[in-house]
Image: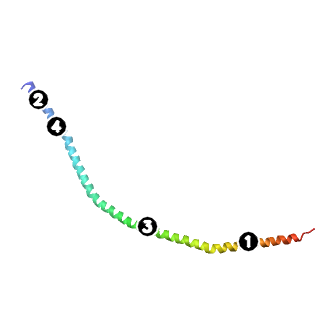
Amino acid sequence: MSGGDIAGLIAAGVFAILVAILAVPVFKLGKVFDELSGSIRSLSEETTPLIGEVTATVSTTNEQLKKVDGMTSNVSDATANISALSSLIAATVGSPLIKVASFSYGVRQAFSARKKSTNRGRRSR
C-alpha cells in the first residue's frame, strides 16, 4: 500500500463518517415531516365538521335577524301611528284650548281696563 492508497482510505472513512453524521438530521427531518402531515390530516378532519356547525349557526342567526327586522319594522310603524295620533290629539284639543285661553285673556284685559276706567273717575281731591 502506498501513501496515496492510505490517503484514499482515510478520505473514504471521513466521507463515510460525514454521511453518517448528516444522515441523522435528515432522518429526524423525515420524522418531522411525518408528524406535520399527520397534524394537517387531523386538522382537516376536525375542520370539516366545524365548518358545518358554523354554517348552521349562521343560518340560524340569519333567521333570528329576520324576526328582529320584522319586530323593528312593526315598532317603527307603531311609533309613526303614535306620532300621528298625538298630532291629531294636539290639533283637536289644542286649538279649542288656545281659543279658551285667548278668550279668558281678553275677558281679563276687559275687566282690568274697566276697573282702571272706573278708578279714574273717582279721583279724590
Which label is found at residue 69? 3
For this view, does 92 lie left or right of residue 67? right
Residue at the spot 79% in from the left edge and 73% down from the top edge: 111
Amino acid type of disc 2?
Gly
Q: CA distance from mark 3 to mark 1?
A: 51 Å
Q: Which mark is residue 105?
A: 1
Determine which residue is flagged by label 2: 8
> Residue 66, image x and y in percent?
40, 67
Q: Residue furthest top?
A: 3
Q: Are marks 4 and 2 in contact (CB under 8 Å)?
A: no
Residue drawn at x 10%, y 30% as measured from the top left:
9
Which of pointers 2 and 3 indicates the residue nearer the eye? 3
Mark 2: secondary structure: helix
Q: Is residue 121 above or below residue 8?
A: below
Q: Nearer the viewer, mark 3 or mark 4?
A: 3
Q: Is 30 located above or below residue 101 in the figure?
A: above
Residue 19 got which mark? 4
Q: Secondary structure at mark 3?
A: helix
